[in-house]
Image: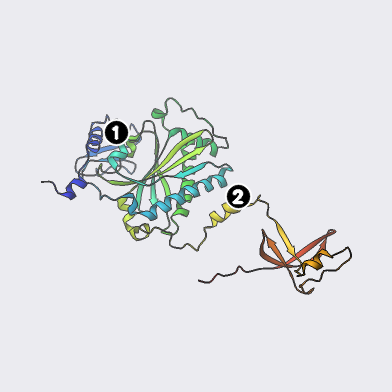
Amino acid sequence: MIGRDDEETRLTIEETEAIARLLAADLPPEGALGGSIGGSLSGPTMGLGADAIVLRYDLVGGAQRRPDDLPGLQLIHERFARELGGEFRRTVGQEGAFFAERIRHARFAEVYANLEVPTALIIASFTGLGCSVIINMYPELMMHLLDVLMGGRGGKVTLPGNLAVRGFTPTEQGLIAHLVGIFSRALGSAWSDVTRVSLEVTRVATDPRHAALWAPGEAMVEQRVTVEWGEARGAIQLFVPLTSLRQYDAQLSRSSPPDKARADPHDLQSMRASLGPVPVELEAVLGHADMTVERLLNLAVGDVLRLDQDPDEPVTVLVEGRPKLTGFPTIHRGNVAVRIEGLIAPERTEG
């Protein structure tokens, strides 16, 4: 008899088939991919080099959670997408559109089975979470971003026919490290309310078999950013083991940022840059006067209107109809002008 808990943690048919494909994979001999490849039916292989790829086939599944269990992580993910656009704008003077999709949970067997050949795969150490992560990109998008980093305009990219075999060149790997630096800064800003994080590249590959870092049943969180940049279209996927997030359950379970009042400096800079060219209307109010309709109809040239403004008091400057500044009338380069003296504090509404 299978209980409810057993049904929830039991591998699906698709996951079982993915594991079968893993076990049946035609792996190259040791050293063919730049490192050792080991396999074990009970756990990680010991005694391999620091850059070894370890295939673990223990079938202990990770804990299951729904994406809406971590609303705070979704907020971080959305901020990461915004920060990524800002980082590219500041770095290369160009900007694409970055859209954060809803975070998704999956077992590693499903993640691994869906990696394409060739792929643009980055394995990195995620400082702050204390784990390794996978960054996966469409190769065409990766080449577009590398071209932009080299000063190009990107555009439609034709992949080298032997990319899956040759991998990335040393020059491309250097640019990818720079690209990960951009990702790292964006993630650092996005996670700043929770903890300090950063990324450090440990491997770059085009063969998805280099991604075999976890057990097939390991619970993973996918954070996907869709990118539209000129003719380039694609997605950036960040895969993080769910267990590494448990240490921040309290923060990631919140549905709002911990400090709404604190403005992010990058957001303010981006807002100022986008609003800078917008024209704004200013008016200097010299004073006010009340009169009857009869007197108004009898006004003639040469009449003097007495205002309620004391000549020694500052005048009010309206910005888009709202009082914002104070100053004194003066003459500047032959024109009537106002010398700004101060700011008007916004009115507080009670209740």
Residue at the limit of the structure toward the front, as seen here: 294
Q: Is residue 294 above or below residue 169?
A: below
Q: Residues within 10 Å of mark 2 (few under 14, many from 20)?
A: few
Residue at the limit of the structure toward the left, as seen here: 1
Percent of width and height locating residue 157: 50, 30
Judging from the image, what secondary structure is the residue with disc 1 in? Answer: loop
The residue wearing badge 2 is: 274
Q: Amino acid at mark 2?
A: Ser
Residue at the limit of the structure toward the top, as seen here: 161
Left or right of 98 in this view: 127:
left
Percent of width and height locating residue 257: 43, 59
Residue at 85%, 68% (x, y): give it.
304
**Cβ atoms under marks 1 and 2 closer than 8 Å:** no
Nearest the eye: 106 or 89: 106
Based on the displayed image, in which of its 4 quarters is residue 253 positioned? Answer: bottom left
Nearest the eye: 6 or 284: 284
Q: CA distance from mark 1 to mark 2?
A: 53 Å
Residue 168 visible within the image: no
Percent of width and height locating residue 118: 38, 31
Left or right of 184 in this view: 244:
left
Based on the displayed image, in which of its 4 quarters is residue 136 positioned? Answer: top left
Q: Amino acid at mark 1?
A: Glu
Q: Is residue 270 above or below residue 149?
A: below
Nearest the eye: 24 or 318: 318
Residue at 33%, 58% (x, y): give it.
249
The residue wearing badge 1 is: 30
Q: Residues within 10 Å of mark 1 (few under 14, many from 20)?
A: few
Residue at 68%, 54% (x, y): give it.
280
